[in-house]
Amino acid sequence: MDTFRHKGLRNRLVQEIAQKGITCNKVLRAIGNVPRHMFFESSFIQFAYQDKAFPIGAGQTISQPFTVAFQTQLLNIKRGDRILEVGTGSGYQAAVLVEMGAKVFSIERQRELYLKSSKLLPQMGYQLSFFLGDGYKGLPQFAPFDGIIITAGAPDIPEELLLQLAIGASMIIPVGRKTQTMIRVTRVSETEFSQEDFGKFEFVPMLKGVVK
Ligand code: SAH
């Protein structure tokens, strides 16, 4: 259930991330609309509107709201854009993308998390396509995408994913082993890519293969 109190806490969170540098109103509105507490176990609900990452089981975390907003802002989504997300996790980032009018394809490698989020989000009214699989491979059968967002720390930029970008589209990816640099790679032409750097972040690692 989403109560008046939750909405109040969410408004405070929106102000907090705006102060930290999120300027896109569409992103702020989406963060203000998605009931983040519904992605938490009931005993941890008081943590839902702090600007922090939090454990979601299977050794994974729901990303910090600022980070979700930051990556989403870098994507520059337009309504109807087809977006590939790697690392469904709790499904919170995916819900923010759907809230912004994107058509979302989200991949998760851990069955437990895939099962949980593919049940929860439709119950909350968020429609998107869920896949259990290895995000390093992407979804060539659904490419090209208008944007790709990676929500785990990748050791390098996966080439197979670059080839799934439409021309003019970007991939937002935290790259690095211990800490990561947020990178936006844009496909300028069939064969050319440009790269921009947006500072340091910390993510759980992007790993190969599927956990059944
Ligand atoms: N977007 C999520 C963040 C979850 S943390 C959210 O909003 O909650 C990152 C997730 O990426 C974890 O669930 C992890 O299992 C997943 N992951 C890591 N490597 C992956 C890969 N190669 N393919 C798909 N998912 C991956």
Image (spheres, rainbow, N blue to C red):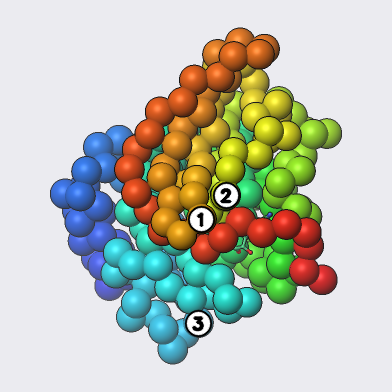
Cβ of mark 2 under 8 A from ligand 1: no
Which numbered marker is on residue 68? none
Cβ of mark 1 under 8 A from ligand 1: no
Instruction: Specify whether 15 is left or right of 180.
Output: left
Q: Residues within 10 Å of mark 3 (few under 14, many from 20)?
A: few
Lower sequence index among marks 3 and 2: 3
Residue at 56%, 60% (x, y): give it: 205
Residue 5 image point, x, y percent: 27, 72
Q: Label 2 sits on what residue type?
A: Pro
Q: Give the residue number, with chain letter if any, for mark 2.
A: 155
Q: Give the residue number, with chain letter if any, for mark 1.
A: 177
Residue 85 image point, x, y percent: 61, 46
Check the image and report above or below for 82 versus 10: above
Residue at 43%, 73% (x, y): give it: 54
Q: Quadrant of the C terminus?
A: bottom right
Instruction: Specify whether 139 is left or right of 41.
Output: right
Q: Residues within 10 Å of mark 1 (few under 14, many from 20)?
A: some
